[in-house]
Image (cartoon, grey):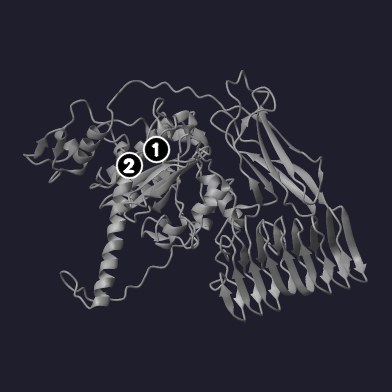
Amino acid sequence: MDDWDGWDDPAELRIRLDVALEHIAELAEENRRLRERLGMPAPDTVAERPEAVERPAPPTLPEMPYGSGLPYADAASAPQAKVALFRALFVGRTDVYANRWVSAKNGRTGWSPAEENPWDKAKSEAERVFFPLTDEVIFRHLSRTEPGQRELHVGLYPMFPDDTTQLLACDFDGRDWQGDAAAYVAACTEAGVPALAEVSRSGSGAHVWIFFTAAVPASLARVLGMALLRRAIDARDGMSLASYDRLFPAQDFLPTHSKGGARFGNLIALPLHGVSRTAGTTLFCDPATWTPYEDQFAYLSLTERLTPGQVQELVETLGPLQAGPSPTTPVLPARPRRSALGKAPKTVRAKAGAMLRISTTGLPPQLIAALKHAANFDASTADILTQRVNKAPVVTTLSSSSAGSSAFGHAVTFTDTVCPGAASTSPTAPPSGTVTVKDGTTVLGTPTLTPGGGPNCSQVQVTTSNLHPGSHAITADYGGDGNYLAADTETLTQTIACTRTITGQVNGSVFATRESTCIINATVRGSVHGVAGGALFIDNSTIQGSVQSSNGTLFGVCGSTVAGTVQVDRATGFVVIGDPGDEHCPGNKTDSVQLTNNHSGVEVVANDIDGSVQVIGTTSTGPFPADGRAAIVGNTIHGSLFCASNVPPPTNRSTPNTVTGSRGGQCTTL
């Protein structure tokens, strides 16, 4: 972690200022509450009770054409769908990310790269190990912090090592941020540039986001951003340069000799932060009213993105940024007529120092705009030569470590190899970026390519041992990079089977055997008993007795009816009792559920349970980002619900359970 004295970036100082103002507001509110409890008057005046103000209704979603290649998600979607949509838009470096920290000693806050042992000042730059930006990290960023869990607000490094970017953001702060940001969005709309407006964490600023379908040079993206800013200033007479903070990325090229976090360029705080959303910030809004959209993810799903070719065409159309009169209005001659700049007062007050400060009182808008840009932008008139180099196609190959079929509970590794296509000529580097690997609609992983698999080729691998028995459509999507085009979706079929499968009618109880037992489309006129060290899976079946498993591995009950109790203890694998989302496991109808001391996470989702539910002593996590804690979600429980000694405590993922009886322990609020 860098020392306070080492922070000399104005943006970092601005973030600290925002945090300090937020902290002051919290202290002021606490002071007011304490005075009220003690019967003390306010320091100055007692404010009258404000009149009730009717809150504006959330804006309706804009009518945008859907089909921009983004995965769809809305408020009701599974967490994996939301993470996939978020990562498809907010694309940056995946080998490192920043997190917001708060000093336990003095409350000081800041942003630093997430890394192993950040407080070790003795290690060299080569010894620093940075944490990658994963689906789990994004899930934690989007989630509201559970009791006992540390808040995580992620900062994205938008600039890739090859000086390209897949997004552009314009930052506005200060007194006039709402009007200035709205003017910038309007300028984007007029130019045909899709843009989204977000209220930043402090609540006193905004980010305006523009997205690209593939990486473009950061310098080109910034030229586009500056041209749009000029149009906004021309349209809004009083737009202050103090309100416009800067663009992200903030540089055309990454610093080559910097140390620490500076080597990655400037970071930008990601939106939809779980804790901040509760406070009404980091939300996307209608810039006309700054009212948040009711369904943030549905709004993001409609986002249009610019292709690299469209970015180039826009830059050529809008023209290179010039000092002086706007390139969107007629260019003034070398010696402009006084009328072209409006009628100025006879005397213009200015103060010379390290900077020249000019009073704008009485100045016409045309002259104000010209002065602002003469002060803020490079007036170089050098000719620009543009050479367009087309991206190269790629050839991808998706393969499985188990030749299409694998045993339930065994690990399967999917490998996607990405190589330059035949049209590539002497590529200087293999393809880079990420590949999204899915089981149907469930994201199994979005790893980063590393060299391998052939000359100038790269590979990714995703390993899972949690696929349920049946047929799975596995897909891999490569999104391209600054040199290579995106690839068509690769697909393979992976079959998962048990070593023993039971179907039809069974007159009596079933005793499972190792390694795995599946009961599928069956009616069992008795109970089912698992076996130590074995996996047990029940699907679309009727069990007229109880289901019991001790010291087993994986356990799943999906779309079934169990007349007795479902009891699982000391399982070493993931335990699933219903989860229509990422596990594709329909809910069940059963008498009661007892889960005790299971060691790899549990899910009890969308079930109808006649009796009670107990979940005790769950540790570790499941296979997907949402499975970081025991999940008891959206069940109808006609008895009681009790939880204890689960680490971390269980969650209902914002979908409460309907409980007729009592709630107790860690499940009191679920």
**Can residue 349 be spotted in the picture?**
yes
Left or right side of 346 for 380: right
Numbered mark located on residue 2 in the image: none
Tell me the quarter of the image containing the C terminus.
bottom right
Give the image quarter of residue 349.
top left
Instruction: Tell which of 592 and 413 is nearer to you.
Output: 592
Disc on the earlier residue, 2 or 1: 2
Q: Position of residue 24 (x, y in %)?
A: 27, 58
| Cα separation between marks 2 and 1 | 8 Å
User: Looking at the image, which residue is at 55% across and 66% down?
Assistant: 654
Which residue is identified by label 2?
11
Q: Are marks 2 and 1 in contact (CB under 8 Å)?
A: yes
**Can residue 189 be spotted in the picture?**
no
Numbered mark located on residue 266 in the image: 1
Describe the element under mark 1 as helix, strand or loop: loop
Q: Position of residue 351 (x, y in %)?
A: 10, 37
Q: Residues within 10 Å of mark 2 (few under 14, many from 20)?
A: some
As drawn, 403 above or below 499: above
Amino acid residing under circle 2:
Ala
Q: Residue furthest front?
A: 122
Instruction: Tell which of 617 and 107 is nearer to you.
Output: 617
Amino acid residing under circle 1:
Asn
Left or right side of 619 for 514: right
